[in-house]
Image (tube, rainbow, N blue to C red):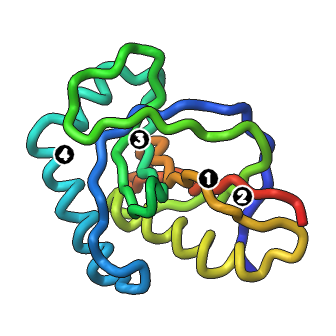
């Protein structure tokens, strides 16, 4: 049984810079390679630092969202500042409501993100009897580091069945 909670969250906005994932949605190796390449690029070219400089907290959001029938993947932050001129930037609106929350840790941001995403989509949602994910943006949220590990949560908006 997956370890998760359901939490009520107010609506919130994430400013993200992103990329379209071109691999088939069932090609997990291809998708993970595209995501890894994207994260390497935003770390090297300064886009992530630009986002961090206007963030209202230290959280880094790893957002997945279907937009106009495209699989989009974003690096983002919560902010109230005007959006900087970033390639493929988007204001991503998360709805008020219940969220499936899976907590986790990892040696790297990738490991953390893959772990909480896998538990949420591979275990918690398939086992759920009284709630369901019906689409919309979802995010792995990197909240910080402790004892040499990154820690964070997966946030997926859900509705009661």
Real-space Cα distance between discs 2 and 3? 18 Å
Instruction: State which tag comes first along the sequence, 1 or 3.
Output: 3
Q: Is residue 64 visible?
A: no
Q: What element carries label 4?
A: helix
Q: What element carries label 3?
A: strand
Residue bearing the label numbered 2: 100
Of the two numbered discs 4 and 3 on the same chain, state the one appearing first in sequence.
Answer: 4
Rendered location of residue 45, percent (x, y)? 9, 40
Relative image position of residue 129 (x, y in whole percent): 87, 76
Task: Check disc 4 and report the residue beneath it.
Answer: 42
Mark 1 lies on residue: 155
Q: How crowded is mark 4: few (under 14 residues within 10 Å), some or many (20 or more)?
A: some
**Residues under labels 2 and 4: Cα distance?**
28 Å
- Viewer-closest of 54 and 14: 14
Question: Which residue is painted at 14% across and 51% down in the image?
Answer: 41
Check the image and report above or below for 83 versus 48: above
Identity of the residue drawn at 10% across and 45% down: 44
Give the crowd class for mark 2: few <14, some 14-19, many >=20 residues within 10 Å: many
């Amino acid at each position: 049984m997956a370890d998760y909670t359901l939490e009520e969250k107010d609506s919130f906005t994430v400013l993200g810079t992103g990329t379209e994932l071109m691999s088939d949605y069932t090609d997990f190796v291809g998708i993970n390679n595209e995501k890894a390449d994207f994260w390497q690029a935003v770390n090297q070219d300064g886009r992530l630092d630009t986002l961090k400089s206007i963030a209202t907290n230290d959280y880094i959001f790893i957002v997945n969202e279907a937009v106009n029938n495209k699989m989009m993947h974003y690096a983002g932050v919560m902010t109230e500042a005007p959006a900087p001129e970033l390639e493929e930037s988007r204001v991503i609106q998360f709805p008020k409501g219940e969220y499936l929350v899976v907590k986790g840790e990892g040696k790297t941001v990738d490991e953390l993100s893959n772990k909480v995403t896998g538990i949420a989509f591979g275990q918690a949602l398939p086992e759920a009897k009284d709630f369901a994910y019906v689409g919309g943006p979802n995010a792995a949220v990197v909240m910080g580091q402790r004892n040499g590990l990154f820690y964070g949560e997966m946030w997926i908006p859900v509705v009661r069945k």
